[in-house]
């Protein structure tokens, strides 16, 4: 039987067998945005992209207690979810769980600050790092050496950075055009 | 024998506690707000467009915060004031949670990356809404 692994908030769990996986999906322990991997899959996939696990047309069979390893016994009459056992940390199996690209986070933080502070030169001194980090992050995520999250975050940081820099530059031009030098 | 103060965090050695550098910088920054306000030019964006950007009033809000005039700070820039009053303590507590994972009362203060999206959305909405005449209570003086 194939060994399955899943990733939840940056932590990797497993290996578990398929019936255990289905139980955990049914109880909500694994949500649709959590990542699933088994041997043979090139990358981790979010559960929602693997419809065979949750489509109502094919409801997962309720595992009988004999199918389960000891400690996983499910009392199907009990209104409570079965206890989640066998949660183990990263055991070094499978490709590394995708992490959010650090530069993407940095880009969004700088971008947010730059659109807040562009009248304070922040448009330049925070917008520029946002744009640079954002471009590097997008490049790193696309290069695909490692599966990484954070493309949307990097794009948001890029856009905020460009907006901050754009407004700051417009202000500089407006400053030069309409006034004698007044600061900046 | 290694003095206990030398070991900071997991297994890194810090030759000096960082707050010795950080704390005076923060104090200097806070005490110079009034001076900064005199030196920085008026905002040309506001001058030309007449609009209040999301950061408009943040300097005045910081000046009010330094003087513990909470209401005045909230009125000048509610987003920035709430970020300082609520967000900053949360960030510090979540950093403490990372450092001392066993402390139970720190458990709710968990930083999630998704917060960044919430902050960005709030900032954009705040920047737009405060320019509506009906929402002028969000705009600075």
Image (cartoon, rainbow, N blue to C red):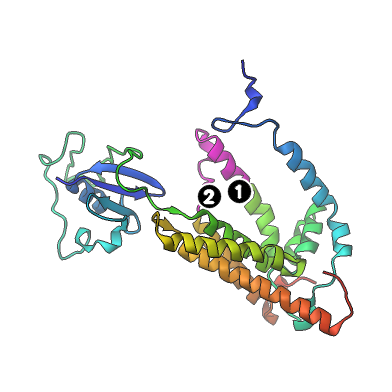
Q: Where A182 sits versus B91, above or below?
A: below
Judging from the image, mark 2 belongs to the subunit labelled B
Percent position of residue B112, x then y: 50, 52
**Where does the image place residue A114, in percent across and percent down from the top left?**
67, 65
Residue with the mark numbered 2: B111
Query: For the point 60% across and 72% down, which residue is it?
Result: B125
> Where residue B127 sits: x, y (%)?
65, 73
Residue A36, above or below B61: above
Q: Mark 1 points at which residue?
A: B91
Going 57% across and 44% down the picture, which residue do you hit? B94
Looking at the image, can residue B121 be seen?
Answer: no
Of residues A145 and A87, the one nearer the viewer is: A145
For the record, the magenta segment spans: B90-112
Give how far across and how far down residue A144 sits, in percent. 40, 59
Q: How far apart are marks 1 and 2 (CA)?
A: 7 Å
Upstream in the sequence, badge 1 or badge 2? 1
For the residue pair B62 and A155, the one nearer the viewer reads as A155
Q: Is residue B139 left or right of residue B34?
A: left
């Amino acid at each position: 039987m194939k060994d399955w692994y899943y990733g939840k908030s940056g932590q990797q769990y497993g290996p578990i067998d398929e019936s255990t996986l289905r139980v955990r999906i049914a109880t909500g322990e694994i949500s649709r945005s959590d990542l699933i991997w088994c041997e043979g899959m090139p990358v981790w996939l979010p559960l929602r992209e693997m419809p065979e696990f949750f489509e109502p047309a094919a409801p997962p069979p309720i595992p009988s207690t004999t199918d389960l390893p000891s400690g996983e016994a499910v009392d199907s009459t009990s209104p409570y979810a079965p206890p989640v056992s066998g949660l183990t940390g990263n055991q070094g199996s499978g490709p590394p769980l995708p992490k959010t690209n650090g530069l993407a986070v940095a880009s969004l933080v700088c971008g947010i600050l730059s659109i807040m502070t562009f009248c304070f030169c922040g448009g330049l001194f925070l917008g520029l790092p946002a744009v640079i980090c954002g471009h590097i992050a997008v490049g790193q995520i696309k290069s695909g050496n490692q599966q990484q999250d954070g493309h949307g975050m990097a794009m948001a940081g890029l856009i905020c950075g460009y907006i901050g820099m754009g407004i700051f530059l417009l202000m500089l031009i407006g400053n030069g055009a309409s006034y004698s030098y007044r600061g900046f | 024998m290694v003095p206990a103060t030398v070991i900071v965090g997991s297994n890194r050695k810090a030759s000096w506690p960082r707050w010795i550098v950080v704390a005076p910088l923060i104090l200097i920054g806070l005490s110079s707000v009034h001076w900064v306000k005199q030196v920085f030019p008026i905002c040309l964006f506001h001058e030309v467009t007449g609009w209040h950007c999301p950061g408009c009033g943040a300097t005045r809000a910081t000046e009010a915060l330094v003087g513990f005039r909470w209401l005045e700070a909230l009125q000048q820039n509610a987003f920035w004031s709430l970020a300082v009053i609520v967000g900053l303590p949360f960030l510090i507590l979540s950093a403490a949670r990372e450092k001392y994972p066993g402390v139970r009362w720190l458990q709710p203060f968990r930083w999630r990356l998704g917060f960044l999206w919430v902050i960005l959305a709030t900032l954009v909405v705040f920047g737009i809404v405060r320019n509506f005449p009906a929402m002028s209570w969000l705009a600075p003086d």
